Image (cartoon, rainbow, N blue to C red):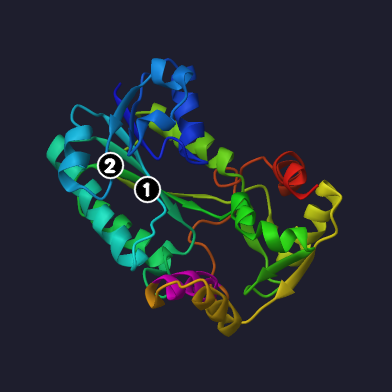
Amino acid sequence: MQIAVTTPTGNVGSRVTRLLIQAGVRPTLLLRDPSRLGPEILEKSRAVQCDQRDTDAVTEATQGVDALFWVDPPTSDPDPVASHAAMGANVAQAVEHNGIRRTVFQSSVGAEKRHGVGEIDGLARTEEQLDRLRASVLHLRCGYFFSNLLLSLDQLRQGLLPTTFPLDSPIPWVDPRDIGDVAAARLLHDGWSGRQVQAVHGPYDLTFAEAARIISEATGKQVEAVAISDAELRQALADQEFTTEQTEAMVGMPAGLRKDFAPENERSAVTTTPTGLGAWAHSVLRPLLS
């Protein structure tokens, strides 16, 4: 079985890569800079220099591949939604041209809305482009990454967890490593076909107020969740010279999930993963906040 993995140095992709290697697979790893991979990974894989925004490069790099783990990588492009849509077109062309039988796509809770969810709209465009193909595709609709907290380290060091979500509104929170576990399992299992959606919800839904309490207990650093408005977030992003499209992509994600939204997949044994926020915060956040 030939399996290709994009973003193999990312929070999820690195976990997928290691699990595939441990399962005896020599994965093909697509990334812009193969030198970022450690020697132990390079020895057990086939690293291919590839920019996922390059249509021909993606198609060439995935020749002979049976299964593909595709992640739209973080982008600094002026219009993130358009960038995701363009990368979605690239993977769709590669899947069709190379006859890739199964694709696991790292999507997000909220993509089912299709429009009005900021940057997640770009993931919805990728879903749609993969759905038009005859090949089998699984969309992993992931909850709020624990690792998103690393973007707020300065505020957390000040004891603050700012958010535009209502402080008492629960959402699914998930450890990226657990997403990698699910992705690797689905890549290794070839007994599924067609279009499928599987949410990855973490162990339980949390409000930001509950998350702040768990972080405080796990790190020994007192943290309080603080509600900020969309306007305040827009101003903060403008002060950092984000483009209008980049700003709206970030503001739109929580705004589109705040009201009258429920994930397409309910919480179940299939969508629930084991790692709690406290364990992650103790091992990852605590050293950074001490």
Residue 201 at what x, y percent from top left?
58, 51
Label 1, secondary structure: give it. Answer: strand
Q: Secondary structure at mark 2?
A: strand
List the residue tagged with mark 2: 136
Q: What's the residue at 30%, 32% (across, down)?
A: 67
Looking at the picture, does residue 79 appear above or below residue 266? below
- Judge whether residue 133 can be spotted in this image: yes
Residue 164 badge: none
Residue at 30% x, 61% y is: 83
Q: Is residue 164 left or right of residue 30?
A: right
Which quarter of the rendered picture does the N terminus lie within? top left
Which one is in front, 268 or 198?
A: 198
- Answer whether residue 41 is magenta in the image: no
Quarter occupied by residue 125: bottom left
The amino acid type of the residue labelled 1 equals: Gln
- Identified at 56% across, 57% down, the residue is 266
Q: Amino acid at mark 2?
A: Ser
Q: Which label was assigned to residue 196?
A: 1
Instruction: Decide whether the magenta segment is chiefly helix, strand or loop.
Output: helix
Q: Is residue 121 above or below residue 216?
A: below
Give the left or right position of residue 239, taking residue 286 as reference: left
Tally of numbered tags: 2
* Nearer-N-terminus badge (1/2): 2
Give the residue at the far left of this rendering.
97
Q: Which residues are magenta?
A: 246-257
**Residue 15, image x, y percentages:** 51, 33
